[in-house]
């Protein structure tokens, strides 16, 4: 990886306290994110994949500075943004935008679609008045919406159109990075592909980087350059997507792939389902390797030693004592 990182996340942790007893004292903590490091280059898509509750959305919120980390650093273009003062925060937010699973929830139902997309432009002083309207019209066209839809309200759009509206809003202030949290999981499969292809086209055109969060490996395969697999607050495997799909090295990744809807049915049949049981609670993760309670290869050492994320082949990182 020769290009300097656009986003660098170092040893990030986010623990949510658990309170109990008569005095509601802290009796524990949910370790939603527990020592996670990764980087994203300009123009790159890093996919974060894992089951519900693995901490991937918490990472997204922490990178967006919607919640404060318990520990670790976040650097954007080399600048440490972990503890930015509120005044600097506003300017920082322009560089990192987000696309939600449900864009409707973040849109004011009383504002026209044109106003929703134009608001960030005016707020950041990118354009004013007539120029804002022109810019919004061109953004609408770019994301596949008719410019006359600017007069409509969010509830008048379909799910896919609303997601295009959300993309236009995110794009309006020329961000460097977009955090996309399950942006297509509420859409029909055919609409999913259209939105993913739009995101890929926009990435090429604007040099955007994406932190793309999803539980869906088929979606990840479509959009990601590299993929980080998460399990109970930790990254267990991080690799180029071809390496990850062709030669998965972590038993949990193997399990995820075996359960996923692979496009090639022959290969799907070859993959044996290996994982058993439910994900343990992040409030009480198993000691050592968090995956040892479900891993078919676990040995005694796995119950006491947490495997570090090691580079086992160029660009291929795995956290497993046996790989
Ligand atoms: Fe399985 Fe042990 Fe590797 Fe964890 S460290 S994935 S329990 S073999």
Image (spheres, rainbow, N blue to C red):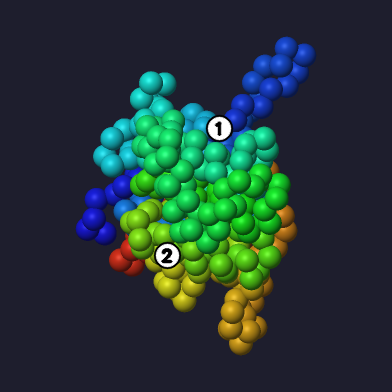
Residue at image location 42% in from the left, 65% down from the top: 201
Of residues 242 and 154, the one nearer the viewer is 154
Residue at image location 61% in from the left, 41% down from the top: 112
Q: Earlier in the sequence, mark 2 or mark 1?
A: 1
**Direction from residue 76 to residue 118 in the image, left or right:** right
Which secondary structure lies at badge 1?
strand
Residue extending furthest bottom? 266
Q: Residue 55: horizontal and vertical position, in percent?
A: 57, 45
Distance from the alpha carbon under mark 2 to that under mark 1: 37 Å
Q: Is residue 253 visible?
A: no
Q: Residue 315: horizontal and vertical position, in percent?
A: 33, 63
Of residues 301 and 226, the one nearer the viewer is 226
Disc 1 CB within 8 Å of nearest ligand 1 atom: no
Residue at image location 39% in from the left, 59% down from the top: 203
Does residue 179 lie above or below 310 as drawn? above
Residue extending furthest top? 23
Does residue 78 lie above or below 246 as drawn? above
Disc 2 packing (10 Å; few <14; some 14–19; many ≥20): some
Q: Dividing the picture into quarters, in which one does residue 259 lie? A: bottom right
**Direction from residue 157 to residue 60 in the image, left or right:** left
Q: What residue does disc 1 label?
A: 15
Residue at image location 26% in from the left, 39% down from the top: 78
Q: Residue 213: horizontal and vertical position, in percent?
A: 54, 53
Q: What residue does disc 2 label?
A: 201
Residue extending furthest front? 130
């Amino acid at each position: 990886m020769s290009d300097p990182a656009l986003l660098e996340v170092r040893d990030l942790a986010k623990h949510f306290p658990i309170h109990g007893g008569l005095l509601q004292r802290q009796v524990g903590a949910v370790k939603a994110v527990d020592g996670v490091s990764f980087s994203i280059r300009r123009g790159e898509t890093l996919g974060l994949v894992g089951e519900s509750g693995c901490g991937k959305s918490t990472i997204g919120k922490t990178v967006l500075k919607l919640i404060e980390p318990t520990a670790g650093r976040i650097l954007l273009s080399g600048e440490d943004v972990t503890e930015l003062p509120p005044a600097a925060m506003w300017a920082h937010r322009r560089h990192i935008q987000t696309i939600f699973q449900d864009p409707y929830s973040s849109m004011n139902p009383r504002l026209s679609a044109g106003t929703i997309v134009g608001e960030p432009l005016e707020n950041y002083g990118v354009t004013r008045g007539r120029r804002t309207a022109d810019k919004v019209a061109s953004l609408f066209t770019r994301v596949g919406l008719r410019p006359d839809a600017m007069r409509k309200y969010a509830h008048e759009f379909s799910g896919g159109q609303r997601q295009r509206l959300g993309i236009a809003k995110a794009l309006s202030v020329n961000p460097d990075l977009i955090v996309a949290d399950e942006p297509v999981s509420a859409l029909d499969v055919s609409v999913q592909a259209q939105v993913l292809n739009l995101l890929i086209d926009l990435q090429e055109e604007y040099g955007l980087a994406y932190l793309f969060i999803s539980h869906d490996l088929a979606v990840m395969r479509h959009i990601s350059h590299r993929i980080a697999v998460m399990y109970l607050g930790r990254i267990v495997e991080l690799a180029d997507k071809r390496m990850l799909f062709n030669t998965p090295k972590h038993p949990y990744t193997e399990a995820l792939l075996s359960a996923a809807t692979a496009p090639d049915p022959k290969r799907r049949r070859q993959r044996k389902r290996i994982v058993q049981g439910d994900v343990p609670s992040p409030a009480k993760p198993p000691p050592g390797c968090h995956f040892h309670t479900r891993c078919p290869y676990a040995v005694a050492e796995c119950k006491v030693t947490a495997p570090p994320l090691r580079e086992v082949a160029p660009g291929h990182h795995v956290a497993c004592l046996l790989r």
